[in-house]
Amino acid sequence: MGVFRYTAMRADGERVRGLLTGESEQAVIVELEARALTPVAVEVTAERSPTAKVSARRIGEAYGQLADLLHAGVPLLRGLKLLAGRRSNQRLAGVFRDLAAAVEKGSDLGAAMEASPGVFPPVHVAMVRAGEKGGFLESVLAKLGALVTKQAELRSKIVGNLIYPAVLIVLGLVIGGVIFGVFVPKFRPMLSRLGDDLPAITSFVFAISDAIGKHGLVTGIVLLVALAAAYNVLQLPAWRERVEGWKLRAPIAGKIVRGIAAARFCQLLGTMLANGVPMLAALRIAKSGTGNLLMERAVDRASDAVRAGEPLAGPLAQSGLFEDDVIEMITVGEQANNLDDVLIKVGDTMEARLDRMLGVAVRLVEPLILVLLAGIVGTVAAALLLPMSMMSGKL
């Protein structure tokens, strides 16, 4: 994908200039003609979208602020310049400064956002374009801001719920490193008198101690190489599909993973449909926002079914990734011709359900980690006390 600068003529003879992202010059020309613009000049430019990362929450807040400005009667260009002039977040200000410059040169807001794919995902661009073409950009920005903010809050909840288990895991690794690297080696000289008569559990603990203590550098290198190899293998399509399947079938985590992917899909698809994006285009964009390979394939099959004139609920039900009550609600929404509202409500309901499930899962993980730590300590204790009792019996 490249960024192209274009000059074109409107039907009334007005000359407009702007930026478009496309795979080739011909693709940009086709896009301009689809917008009822006659291309005059199209050339690739060295300009690139800002590479600085901007948090999703900040982007969502900016959409809401821009919608408020438009509702108050502030012109779009003036609103973009106001957001670009704020000093509280220089990265976000730089992004809107580029948008304002592109719009001032005659580009549509959607086209200007498309030239910054690293900042604005395709779903944002599609919704803004639909709002510009339909004349309801203010409503689109308000709903898009609410959607992005809601997804950022869900992500924050997930991360927040995982902080304490992560702290326990790190603490467990530190404790294990101290036990095997410092504490266990002190017993080796005392137990060496048993020679080959060491119990198997003691030999196992000493082997781990040697790997962490004596050969720590080699062990670290081997682990890094193994992790790198595993990562490369898991990038292969066949293995990615297997891993996704394992994640979805996991006893507790599987239900959470399915719920997150389904909630994101319903919220994205419902919001796009509510803002005038055609069904097939909305499905194509929403699938990339699910973050799950199997969900993407299920959405592809649903797109084929919709293209053939079939309802959406059937292929989604066959995928096994959606709960029965969700499928039933989607079916009712299609029959009542209010699928957009139903999908948004389903997404909100699933998000609340996920919040409760995450809380329960975290409460289960905490004692499991503590039990694992206790098991490690108990194993070490048994490995050291058993040979000592054998030595005392020989005296």
Image (tube, rainbow, N blue to C red):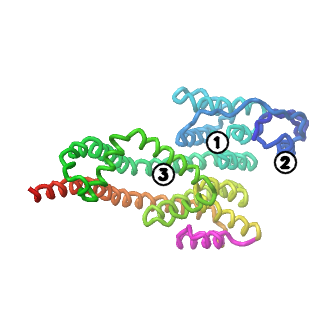
Near-viewer residue (349 or 181)? 181
Residue 324 included in the magenta stretch of the image: yes
Q: Secondary structure at mark 1?
A: loop
Q: Residue at x 51, y 28 (%)?
A: 88
Residue at mark 2: 34
Name the amino acid type tagged 1.
Answer: Phe
Name the residue at the left extreme: 395
Q: Secondary structure at mark 2?
A: helix
Name the amino acid type tagged 2.
Answer: Ala
* Quadrant in which the N terminus is drawn: top right
Left or right side of 165 for 49 = right
- Image coords of residue 285 (percent x, y): 67, 54
Q: Is residue 229 above or below residue 367?
A: above
| Residue 255 seen in this snapshot | yes
Q: Earlier in the sequence, mark 2 or mark 3?
A: 2
Q: Earlier in the sequence, mark 2 or mark 1?
A: 2
Label pair 3/1, CB-CB below 8 angstroms: no
User: What kind of secondary structure does the magenta stretch mostly adopt?
Assistant: helix
Residue at mark 1: 120
Q: Residue at x 26, y 45 (%)?
A: 179
